Amino acid sequence: MLSEVEQVRLRISRATDAKKKSQYGQFFTSERTAAFMAGLFPRSKGTCHLLDAGAGIGSLSAAFLERWRSGELKFDHVELEAFEIDETLHEPLNETLRRFDRKSFTKRVRGDDFVLTASDWLSGTLFMSPPQFTHAILNPPYKKIGSSSAHRIALRRVGIETVNLYSAFVALAVSLLAPGGQIVAIVPRSFCNGPYYRPFREFVLNRCVIRHLHLFDSRDKAFKDDDVLQENVIVRLERGGRQQEVTVSTSGDDTFSDISTRKHSFDAIVEPNDSERFIHIPTCAPGTSETTGSPAFHHSLGDIGLSVSTGPVVDFRLRDHLVRMPEKGCVPLLYACHLTPTGTVWPLQDSKKPNAILRNDETEKWLYPNGFYCVVRRFSSKEEKRRIVARVVDPRSFKKTPALGFENHLNVFHENRNGVPEALAHGLAAYLNSTMVDESFRRFNGHTQVNATDLRQMKYLSRQDLIGLGKWAMKQGIPSQSAIDKKLGTLPA
């Protein structure tokens, strides 16, 4: 039997058009997810100062308050500050909260902008000390922040640099937590890696310890009533404190019926020497590799003498030097469309992209010497079967050309800006195209971009094993997916 709050959530969600949902970037939390999130808070007593920013109809607050009413949380008093900018939701939000009215519960529903208000609190603009919350429970809005918007300006005033409202909400909530304060939030996984969220990761990890991470195996289940296709993670953070083991749980969907839980050292979550502060969410047993289940697959690109870089040719910046079909004084310019499972197809007669770039003093620094390279495209659709798609560039496809141009939507594996041995290029491509690598990358990468930074953080086979794999792949012609996966499974641990 659905609770009254859940029935209201479903009714309002179905009646709200997609344009309005996109405008606010807010999708309501299901009853089961809200209960799971509220259940992550440790037992506490005393006075609770609870923050619910982006409260919607109050599903998260209700789950938290229900746990208090049942006696699991031993607070003498609960003071709730609920922010909801959509004033049409204030009536159902107040109705939700009235169910918990008692002398020991006080509440305030605010219709002002949480980012602007919290930034004013923290910067002292309001000439008052900011509130300090003991607990925060969040399903923040998911919406990009413009670089010159009022939100970005306000956030920078309090030392927060981020690109999306969801990370802004979390960073502000962290800033407003009292020492030892707890925050539980459901957010997209995109913050875990990639360069855009590095300042946010630094901000949070410098102020909090991670206590719990929960991952959904299926990315369309957390907000399935809103048809949201997004990889989400539930995280519990504690302000200050001493970092200990991190509890990592997974479930197939928001029923949490098949939940699996393990504890991992913090070093398995954030590698000690990782300057990017990537947050890994291991789904295999502690002490084994996320890629293969074997600790033997642990070589860095530096170990195997390779580097990876984003393709340096940004076509709109070099527009005057691009040529649709090759001519004298040009060298090949490669886009993803030129690279197929059967090899490099160049030039493409019907391509909308240019096939060549003039080689001159202005373009020379953007070119690579002709040679064998392994390339990975940077962008994919969330619904594509593979996230990582690797191809081999064969210099014989271009006759005697001295140089190559790689467009910016490709990542290029190279050896000091030169080509790599043929067998190594084929072995690297086969390894990256394996199912185990792709699945591992999807667990670690929450967005559709495959950045050079992500590829640098991955672990690889040794150079010797990659060359051996490449020699095998070259004999196969075009090895099938099953053949690649089977071959990877026979490599020694």
Image (tube, grey):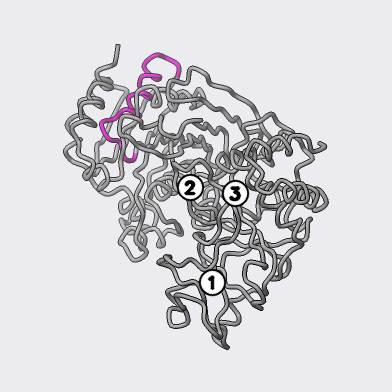
Q: Residues within 10 Å of mark 2 (few under 14, many from 20)?
A: many
363 to the left or right of 415: left
Quadrant (top left/top right/bottom left/bottom right) for the C terminus = top right
Q: Using the image as rendered, state which of residue 174 and residue 405 is in the foreground.
A: 405
Q: Marks 3/1: CA distance?
A: 33 Å
Q: Marks 1/2: CA distance?
A: 27 Å
**Residue positioned most to the bottom:** 361
Q: Vertical placement of 174 versus 356: above or below? A: above
Labelled pair 2, 3 in contact (Cβ < 8 Å): no
Q: Residues within 10 Å of mark 1 (few under 14, many from 20)?
A: many
Q: Earlier in the sequence, mark 3 or mark 1?
A: 3
**What range of the chain is rendered magenta?**
53-72
Q: Using the image as rendered, state which of residue 282 and residue 300 is in the foreground.
A: 300
Mark 2 sits on what residue?
447
Q: Amino acid at mark 2?
A: His
Q: Using the image as rendered, state which of residue 379 and residue 339 is in the foreground.
A: 339
Report x, y in % for residue 47. Answer: 41, 29
172 to the left or right of 4: right
Report x, y in % for residue 485. Answer: 68, 37
Question: Is 332 part of what is drawn in magenta?
Answer: no
- Secondary element at image label 3: loop
Mark 1 sits on what residue?
333
Mark 3 sits on what residue?
278
Closer to us: mark 2 or mark 3?
2
User: In percent of the image, x 43 and y 68: which residue is there?
Assistant: 353
Q: Residues within 10 Å of mark 3 (few under 14, many from 20)?
A: many
Closer to us: mark 1 or mark 2?
1
Labelled pair 3, 1 in contact (Cβ < 8 Å): no
User: In percent of the image, x 64 and y 62: which residue is there?
Assistant: 393
Q: Vertical placement of 287 versus 162: above or below? A: above
